[in-house]
Amino acid sequence: MIRITLRYEPIRNLLADPELNKFRKTLADRANGPILEPFLDALDRPDVVLNMISTPAAKIPGIVPACIVLKGNRAFETGVVGNDYLKKCLGTLTKIRAQNLGLATTGKKGRVSSWMPGITVAEIYRFTPTVESVVTFNPSLPKGMSIFSAGLE
């Protein structure tokens, strides 16, 4: 049996990040709860985290795995439509999660609308060597081998 282990900080522990300062009112606004709470929960799901780590290989925006699990959540789907500031907040939350996982921004955007119509485009991330500290394998990979090394540039 092969075991894959993910080690990452819960997203709510990362909410003190200074990049979120401009969104403090948005994050505290109870009216945004039906949108923000499921999104934060999604960013902590192991399947979302593992898929976020995989997105650079396919050049898919990092927010897509969270959008996929939120598909069908009417409050989220309707809440993001037309609310550009809230979408920027979600993008920043995704960026903070991505950085925590060892991913870095590329400055490139990719289409999200086929997974979540209310969100048009979002950041595509790239691997950094730090991503290897988030994912471990048992048994270990052979010395010098990494599943992420091909994506490091």
Image (spheres, rainbow, N blue to C red):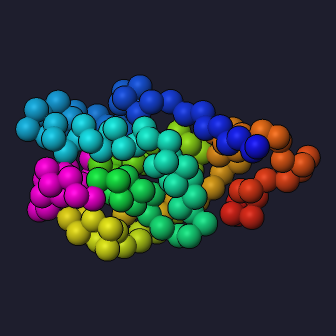
The structure residue drawn at horizontal position 65% and vertical position 37%, both measured from the top left corner, is 5
The image quadrant that residue 3 belongs to is top right
Q: Nearer the viewer, residue 53 or 86?
A: 53
What secondary structure do most residues of the magenta stretch adopt? Answer: helix
Q: Position of residue 47 (x, y in %)?
A: 49, 48
The image quadrant that residue 45 belongs to is top left
Q: Nearer the viewer, residue 151 or 114?
A: 114
Magenta region: 71-89
Queried whether the magenta region covers residue 75, the answer comes back as yes
Q: Position of residue 31 (x, y in %)?
A: 8, 38
Q: In this rendering, is residue 127 above or below 32? A: below
Q: In the figure, is residue 115 to the left or right of 26?
A: right
Q: In this rendering, is residue 52 above or below 107? A: above
Q: In this rendering, is residue 100 above or below 153? A: above
The structure residue drawn at horizontal position 15% and vertical position 55%, both measured from the top left corner, is 74
**Could you tell me if residue 107 is visible in this image?**
no
Q: Position of residue 1 (x, y in %)?
A: 76, 43
**Could you tell me if residue 78 is visible in this image?**
yes
Q: Position of residue 126 (x, y in %)?
A: 58, 59
The structure residue drawn at horizontal position 11% and vertical position 62%, both measured from the top left corner, is 82
Queried whether the magenta region covers residue 21, the answer comes back as no
Q: Nearer the viewer, residue 41 or 120?
A: 41
The structure residue drawn at horizontal position 29% and vertical position 53%, both measured from the top left corner, is 70
- Count the marks: 0
